[in-house]
Image: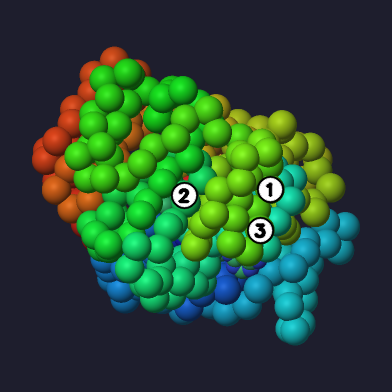
Amino acid sequence: MKNLVILGGGYGGLTILDGLLEKLPSDVNVTLIDRLPFMGLKTEYYALAAGTVSDHHLRISFPDHPRMTKHFGTVEEIDLAGKKVMLQNDEPVAYDQLVIALGCTDNYHGVPGAEEFSYSIQSLHASRRTNDKLSSMKPSAHVHIVGGGLSGIELAAELRESRHDLQITLLDRGDRLLSSYQPRISRYVQEWFKKHNVEVCHKVSISRVEQDALYNGDELMHSDAVVWTAGIQPVEVVQKLNVTKDRSGRVVVNEYSQIEDHPEIFVCGDCASLQFAPSAQAAEAQGEQIAHVLLAFWKNETPKLKPIKLKGMLGSLGQKAGFGLNVIGDTSITGRVPRMLKSGVLWMSKHNLG
Ligand SMILES: Cc1cc2nc3c(=O)[nH]c(=O)nc-3n(C[C@H](O)[C@H](O)[C@H](O)COP(=O)(O)OP(=O)(O)OC[C@H]3O[C@@H](n4cnc5c(N)ncnc54)[C@H](O)[C@@H]3O)c2cc1C
């Protein structure tokens, strides 16, 4: 029997399982290892942190199959030479083929105190902890969200709707929010924040975070809670992996998503160096490809891959407004329609992956 081990049952890992299980050859066993007993819909963690949804609504059950084992545990390291996955307080798991789909974690860019004193929305556990903090703050307390990208914007807007009484400041490094998108979208988002009393500060470069404060260069800002949404990098297991990586620390893979020197290992989603920015959409599209490649390899066939095509981006501003951009970035929509589309995409994810 061959043993395929999949590390991480998120968007990428679950899509691979979805593509494989019904066609699994009789001489292949699959082991899924994850520290969660279900898939967490990470794209909604901002809402969990803001307290507008419970984590119960963000869970998707892992599938069942007679030749699939679900192993709940935390991966600590991958022993490339020994072809083993090392787990925390558990026996190692041997593999013949391995998929690394462990997602990403915060990148603090070496800012002192950021990891220690800020809150995160990069994992279910961290988002629950962030929600604990944000929901128990006294009225008028001041929350700073560092990072004016999609997740920082979604969190700031959702938190405003969840807690009208807090002071919320979004700290952005650039001179306009979502600077890689059309100026029209930036203006719409900026207007929404103005109307909803969320302060936005541009050209901010955080140099230090402390228990009750953060610094923009030398300028001290008192804060009752700092949430970090200012960058991501692959998880620590991948950071420790001695293989070729790109400038963002993502693992370089070939056209079949394999590590060149370790063709038995496939890397998917936020851990892989793709031509796209990390996203659930890219992880799912790549997951479909990896399932196809594995099935072809097991039949000794050459995989026939269609190029990955992404559909664009959707973001929310609370429950009633949003923005969207097509994949080329030349057509944008704002208002209630993109918000409804985003809810539709969430529903589809639950339906397709669940
Ligand atoms: C607030 C927010 C909003 C976002 N919005 C969007 C959006 O609108 N559209 C979009 O396309 N993308 C969005 N993203 C990005 C998207 O969530 C990620 O790109 C996507 O989840 C990546 O999928 P993945 O399969 O690589 O990893 P994940 O989906 O993160 O899955 C990784 C899995 O690995 C498990 N894991 C991690 N480390 C370990 C370990 N050491 N041991 C065991 N298990 C482990 C985790 O529990 C998890 O199940 C958003 C992200 C955030 C944080």
Describe residue 57's horizontal placement relative to residue 333 as left or right.
right
The amino acid marked with disc number 3 is Glu
The residue mark sitting in front, 3 or 2, is 3
Left or right of residue 55, residue 164 in this image: left
Look at the numbered disc 2 and give the secondary structure of its residue.
strand
> How many numbered circles does the render carry?
3
Q: CA distance from mark 3 to mark 2?
A: 14 Å
In percent of the image, x 32 and y 26: which residue is there?
Answer: 186
Residue that numbered label 3 is attached to: 210
Q: Which residue is mark 1?
A: 208
Q: Which residue is mark 2?
A: 145
Where does the N terminus fall, quadrant-wise?
bottom right
Evaluate if marks 1 and 2 touch, with contact meaning CB atoms under 8 Å apart: no
Q: Could you classify mark 1 by the number of other residues whose Cα lies within 10 Å: few (under 14), some (14-19), or many (20 or more)?
A: some
Classed neighbour count for the residue bearing mark 2: other residues with Cα under 10 Å, few (<14), some (14–19), many (≥20): many
Q: Above or below — where is 205 with respect to 292?
A: above
CA gap, disc 1 and disc 2: 14 Å
- The reply, left or right, for residue 8 in relation to residue 323 is right
Residue 88 falls in image quadrant: bottom right
Q: Are marks 1 and 3 in contact (CB under 8 Å)?
A: yes
Furthest residue to the top? Answer: 330
x%, y% of residue 86? Answer: 77, 71
Amino acid under disc 2: Ile
Query: Residue 288, how many percent across, how many down?
Result: 44, 45
